[in-house]
Amino acid sequence: MAQVGSTTLSPLLREWPGLFLSSLLLLATAVAAPTQETNIGSPSDTSAATLANNVAELRIFLTEDSGMVRGEMATARPSNVAELSLAIGEGTVTFRDDGAGPDRVKGDGVFSARFKFDTTAEFEALRAGLRATIDVLRDPDQDILIRRGPRDIVTAADAIRDAELKTPEILKKARLEAERAARLLDFKDPLRAAKALDINVATTPFQRLPGSRFDPLERKQFKVEYLFDFPIFTTFPPPAPRVAIDRDRSLLITAKDVVEDDELSFDACTGTGSPGGPWSFGHLMRELAHGTGLTPEEFTLHWLLSWRLPHEVNGWIVPARHQQLQHFIDGWRGLSPSGLLDVDYFPARLLAIVNRPDLAGRIGFGAGGSAGEGRLVFGLMTGSCTPASFTVIFEYGIAANSCIEVKAWQQRWKDLDQFDVGTDDYNEALESVTRAFTDHGSNPGQRPNTSSLSQMRTNENQLASGWDMREFRLEDTGLLDLVPVKQTPHNDFNGHETLRDYLGTNEVDILNDRHIVRERFPDDLDPFLGAVSNTLFPIYFWSAPDLNSLIDPVETRRKFSLATCNGCHAGETGTRFTHIGNEGRREMGQPAELSGFLRGETVTVPMSGSAMRRYEDLKERETAMSELLERSCFWLLAFQRSPFVH
């Protein structure tokens, strides 16, 4: 690839004699850099790393000692770790699996500790969910939606029918216990409630919460929170949280007075804003180019010219797409004041600033933890300065090595609520948040850029027919390089027996929202993950033959397809290619349009007959952010990162 890049680029670059490109521009590599994240914490020990992705269930037991509880962290399998110190609230708590102190059995994979915990507040927070669950069990035909997991929202009637088919004994037990559980609503103190109902608090957990490795079929429980062993269904929208989230202020910000701020953003086509402003495309590219030895213009051109060349990624050949590429470059040069390419005048229009708390993970386990992602979304402009069907998303990881750091980061977004959107005070506060991850130096461990960029994603149909989604990451040289698209196999596997085999092999992980599509399948020599994601028509979704051999063919296919780039941006969600912007476009003076998938819609599940699903992703992100802010650090040990990363 290095030779192909060199021989093709050299004559092309001679078209711009005023632009000098260093030899680094001609380097190419297929090695992707590790995920980059803003570093806002310090490293932890290897014991935590061993257990971080192995939590099956968290349990709280009441004690007679007011304000003290016994907590258990049950892992999916035993390990050689005997104790683990974790930051819970203001202090550090040591969990033990050595049979000493509060731990019951040595080496069984259940870590136990005693610590302070506000059980009264937790009990109060669960009352609304308890009441709704009892109502659903009594009369499932009510007009109520149940959220069974991320992007899995169904009517109460459908949820009960599904449980009757798959887990009849669990449902029967819940129905039998419903009237007894209703008596809990008469109390405000959980210990008094337990005594009144003759619940043994030493053996019956006050609360249970499933972790990422929880398997409902294996444990014969619903994958929900439990109160004294009674399931609490999550209604949708959920009951009013203790911490309310304003999505327009702290989750997905599209207000005109933000994206067209006179000092912070810049639109080269209209001249609106300030060249090089902190929310401009040019500023972000300048920060990424830091440490590479290239000018920001050279860095940006190297990325842009990648569409001119064929690439080999994960064993697949990616054809060139460049039918209008020269038009984009000429437009950029025409907008640049000196006639030489100026990154501050790159023709891109800011569409949105995004907080993704649902992508937090490994919370409280030390190094490798994440507080989510921060993103800036742009729509490119054609050479004639009309909005193009071409989106570019800068996606930055936020490293957080403790629960307190996760909460502090999300609180910075929450604090924006005190200002009116688009005012000077609001925009100044938001600038402080975004520059914590967009600017070089935010991730000193990433070399040479010191950038927090996890990946850049593009989605366009301007350079050739059909929509083409790509993912770029910073390589060791500091340049943006094409890498496989996450969670999305090569398009040739759609409808293929190999995909059916993958679904069967990974069905448990898919159903439990923890699957990660590997680069190779079925063997280490067989490329599987796609180099790009192509969407030729808006009803595109993923399927495979002979799915009836699966445990749950409808849901396994749906969840897998929903996690792919082209399934999520097309037929699986009823979306026309982009979720922000009208096919990636925004007119000046207007906020970017948002898809029904983000705002709220009900769609028919492909290949299901008449099954329906409700999607309202912004509400799900509200729930995630609220949980990160309001729930205790003990419960956040079970916070599960969304598998839907796009």
Image: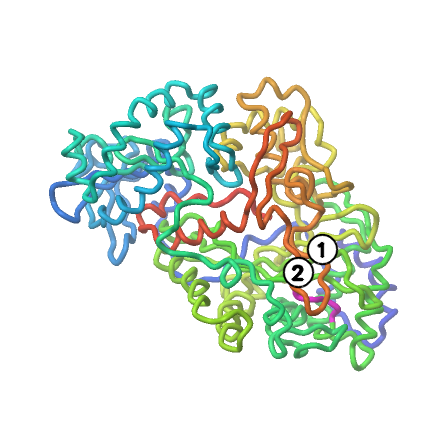
631 and 529: which is toward the camera: 631
Give the mark, 1 or 2, whose residue is nearer the N terminus: 1
Q: Is the residue under label 2 in contact with that under label 1 (CB below 8 Å)?
A: yes
Q: Using residue 118 as the reference point, say whether residue 355 is left or right of it.
A: right
How was this image coloured? rainbow
**Magenta extent:** 346-350
Residue 481: x %, y % from top left: 68, 55
Residue 349 among those drawn in magenta: yes
Which residue does the numbered mark 2 point to in the structure image? 592
493 and 519: which is toward the camera: 493
Distance (Cα) linking label 1 and label 2: 7 Å
Is residue 639 positioned above or below 492 on the image? below
Inspect the image, locate mark 1, and give the three-letter code of the amino acid beneath it.
Answer: Asn
Inspect the image, locate mark 2, and give the three-letter code of the amino acid beneath it.
Answer: Ala
SS for tag 2? loop
Which residue does the numbered mark 1 point to in the structure image? 582
> Given the current orientation, which residue lies at the most extreme bottom position?
338
Residue at 73% across, 71% down? 297
